[in-house]
Amino acid sequence: MNLVLLGPPGSGKGTQAKRLQASHHILQLSTGDMLRAEVASGTERGLRTKETIEGGHLVADAIIIEMISDRIRGEDARRGFILDGFPRTIPQARALDEMLVREEMHLDRVVVIDLDDDAIVERIVGRFTCESCGAGYHDTFKKPKIEGACDACGGTRFSRRADDLPQTVRARIEEYHALTEPIIAHYEAKSLLNRVIGMADLDDVTRQLEDVLAFSVG
Ligand code: AMP
């Protein structure tokens, strides 16, 4: 099963993709995670994109397309993948179409997680992650049960994304409306699109996603 998860920043794409990866044994391909790893290890691609990412802007299509086409060709993507954070522009969506034809693959579903702009800012500003196991927390909505220790693994080191500041989040929302939303029509025209309500709690969004998949992929 090959999926695309679309949605504004903060809609929970990453969390839901991880859950689907575990329940369906398919690979999560997050371009945001790939870029952050490149920035952290100081690769050439990381150095070229750091400023753009931290400013809340989209990285050039050519860089992203090259990065993702390397990963889609990987043996581990053959059993199925969830694209999380890609495509994000019409040229990226067209490049994905071409990539899939070349690799004799296809998309089963494209699911949009809908969320209002006000809720986006509220959710993103204040979120942080355990550095050891990746569990996600929030200053207001989800504090660790014991302050300073991860509920899942007991880790005591946490990190915040450099692009989660309020002014950067606003830039990311604007780019989502201007550049990413138009690809919804691209997939609607191919009868691949479903929507789920992102305002619901995490488990409810997972249930909505599983329903879409059960109904449309079988
Ligand atoms: P994310 O983790 O998906 O929110 O992505 C974090 C940042 O990485 C974005 O704000 C962009 O700067 C960059 N990025 C991730 N995926 C893409 C993409 N498909 N196209 C352009 N930039 C991207």
Image: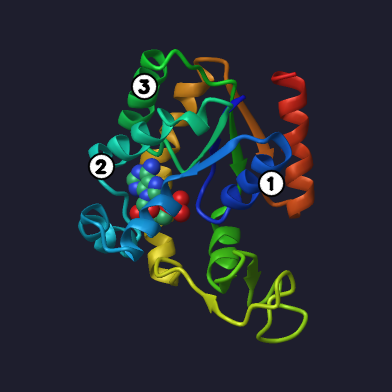
Q: Residue at x 65, y 86 (%)?
A: 148
Left/right of residue 4 with respect to residue 145 in the rendered view: left
Write down the residue under mark 2: 63
Mark found first going from the N terminus, 3 or 1: 1
Disc 1 beta carbon < 8 A from ligand 1? no
Q: Residue at x 77, y 80 (%)?
A: 145
- SS of the residue under disc 3: helix
Report the Cα–Cα distance between label 3 and label 1.
26 Å
Mark found first going from the N terminus, 2 or 1: 1
Under mark 2, the amino acid is Ile
Left/right of residue 183 with respect to residue 69 in the rendered view: right
Give the percent coordinates (x, y) of residue 205: 73, 45
Q: Quadrant of the N terminus?
A: top right
- Residue 118 seen in the current view: yes
Under mark 1, the amino acid is Arg
Q: Quadrant of the C terminus?
A: top right
Report the Cα–Cα distance between label 2 and label 3.
15 Å
Depth order, front residue of 118/19: 19
Write down the residue under mark 1: 19
Report the Cα–Cα distance between label 2 and label 1.
28 Å
Mark found first going from the N terminus, 2 or 3: 2
Q: Residue at x 38, y 25 (%)?
A: 96
- Residue 174 seen in the current view: no
| Discs 2, 3 touching: Cβ within 8 Å | no
Res 99 label: 3
- SS of the residue under disc 2: helix
Give the percent coordinates (x, y) of residue 169: 44, 63
Give the percent coordinates (x, y) of residue 66: 28, 36
Under mark 3, the amino acid is Met
Depth order, front residue of 95/44: 44
Disc 2 beta carbon < 8 A from ligand 1? yes
- SS of the residue under disc 1: helix
